Image (cartoon, rainbow, N blue to C red):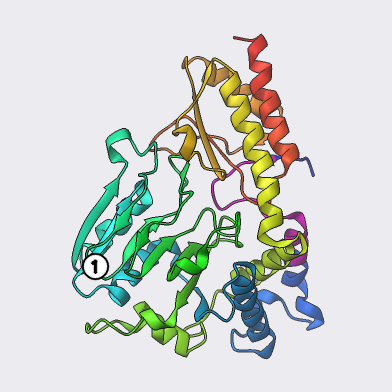
């Protein structure tokens, strides 16, 4: 099979060993003689998969023995836009708006109570992260999005608040060391750094739940899912299994600290190239650039055609920016190799001789 340098923003690249193990499990899951696609979600074999995945999620983020519960649920991060306010909002919540996904989260929360946008980067097309955000007023919780896949920005600090802190970490969870124990509820779609699409990971301190007086539909109630050990209804068996394989792979690499070192090298190489070429412009504020999603444009529109052709010849795939903003975006998730980034930067340097 030809080597493709896949920079897809999601569903994203996974390690080759995960593909191989998952493919084998489709044919014969752990010598059971059955496919992973056709075993019961309540079988002892799958429950062992689910429990190991939940435990590894806590372990890799340093959240063991700190009052957190890990859940693998369905609906993606978009479901959590609604499940969070249903479970936590009594009257008012505070949100930091740094892009499309936080804007969507705000829209959903407004259905259930008052939402105060305490900081926003919308005034400059979400090209930066608001600085030194502190929330001192009484709110039920504070919500932020740690990394913005569309606009290529990333928080480097944790907002200060005495209220429960909620974070959508869909696109940078497990990619860097972060003080996750200062966040009371973390949620993330799996299709970036966790596993395959179709499942989301929620890490929540049990002590923040059960305080709202509203009737919560069972599907939207974290306590209900905790009581049922992530098996309130039929689990996405295959997606949870790929999450487990990927989490095992991450631990084998040395964990989050080790993968962060590699991710830093990838991002540094690409941003150095963007900055030194006078016909390319990064779209995010330099101090807020994401190490997971590097966004850039060419100063002359005609260069797009040249770049697209060179990318096709070099087997560089899924490099287009989000349809809402255009330009280009290289997603540098954990499984993307430094070699692939080197190929991409060589394509950018090659353009010097053609423009």
The vertical placement of 232 against 153, above or below, is below
Residue drawn 45% across the image and 75% down it: 204
**Quadrant of res 246:** bottom right
Q: Could one spot residue 232 in this view of the protein?
A: no
> Which residue is denoted by mark 1 in the rendering?
139
Out of 212 and 317, give the one closest to the viewer. 212
The vertical placement of 132 against 301, above or below, is below
Residue 115, percent across and down? 21, 60
Magenta-highlighted residues: 5-21
- Please indicate whether residue 218 sits to the left or right of residue 200 in the image: left
Out of 179 and 28, give the one closest to the viewer. 179
**Quadrant of res 183:** bottom left
Tally of numbered discs: 1
Quarter of the picture holding the N terminus: top right
Residue drawn 52% across the image and 42% down it: 290
**Quadrant of res 31:** bottom right
Taking the view exactly as shown, the residue that stands out farthest to the right is: 31
Q: Could one spot residue 84 in this view of the protein?
A: yes
Quarter of the picture holding the C terminus: top right
Residue 336, percent across and down? 68, 46
Residue drawn 66% across the image and 79% down it: 52
Residue 182, percent across and down? 46, 67
Q: Residues within 10 Å of mark 1 (few under 14, many from 20)?
A: many
- Please indicate whether residue 58 sits to the left or right of residue 99 in the image: right
Residue 187, percent across and down? 46, 66
- Please say whether residue 138 is one of the residues in the magenta stretch: no
The vertical placement of 50 against 189, above or below, is below
Residue drawn 74% across the image and 71% down it: 25
- Please indicate whether residue 114 sits to the left or right of residue 184 in the image: left
The vertical placement of 121 against 216, above or below, is above
Out of 349 and 314, give the one closest to the viewer. 349
Label 1, secondary structure: give it: loop
């Amino acid at each position: 099979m030809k080597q493709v340098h896949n920079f897809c923003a999601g569903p994203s690249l996974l390690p080759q060993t995960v593909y191989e193990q998952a493919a084998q499990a489709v044919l014969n899951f752990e010598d059971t003689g059955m496919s992973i696609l056709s075993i019961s979600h309540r079988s002892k074999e799958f429950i062992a998969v689910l429990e190991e995945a939940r435990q590894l999620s806590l372990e890799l983020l340093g959240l063991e023995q700190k009052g957190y519960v890990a859940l693998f649920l369905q609906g993606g991060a978009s479901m959590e836009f609604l499940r969070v306010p249903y479970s936590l909002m009594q009257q008012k919540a505070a949100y930091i708006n740094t892009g499309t996904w936080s804007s969507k989260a705000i829209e959903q929360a407004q259905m259930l109570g008052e939402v105060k946008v305490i900081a926003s980067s919308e005034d400059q097309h979400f090209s930066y992260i608001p600085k030194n955000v502190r929330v001192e007023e009484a709110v039920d919780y504070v919500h932020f999005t740690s990394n913005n896949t569309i606009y290529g920005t990333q928080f480097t600090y944790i907002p200060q608040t005495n209220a429960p802190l909620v974070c959508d970490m869909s696109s940078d969870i497990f990619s860097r060391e972060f003080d996750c124990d200062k966040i009371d509820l973390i949620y993330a779609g799996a299709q970036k750094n966790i596993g395959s699409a179709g499942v989301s990971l929620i890490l929540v301190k049990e002590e923040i739940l059960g305080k709202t007086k509203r009737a919560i539909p069972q599907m939207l109630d974290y306590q209900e899912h905790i009581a049922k050990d992530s098996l309130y209804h039929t689990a996405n068996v295959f997606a949870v299994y790929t999450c487990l394989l990927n989490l095992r792979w991450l631990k084998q690499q040395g964990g989050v600290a080790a993968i962060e070192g590699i991710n830093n090298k990838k991002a540094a190489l690409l941003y150095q190239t963007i900055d030194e070429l006078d016909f390319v412009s990064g779209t995010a504020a330099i101090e807020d650039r994401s190490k997971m999603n590097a966004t850039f444009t060419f100063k002359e529109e005609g260069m797009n055609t040249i770049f697209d052709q060179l990318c096709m010849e070099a087997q560089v795939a899924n490099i287009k920016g989000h349809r809402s903003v255009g330009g280009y975006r290289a997603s540098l998730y954990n499984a993307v190799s430094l070699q692939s980034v080197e190929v991409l930067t060589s394509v950018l340097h090659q353009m010097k001789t053609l423009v």
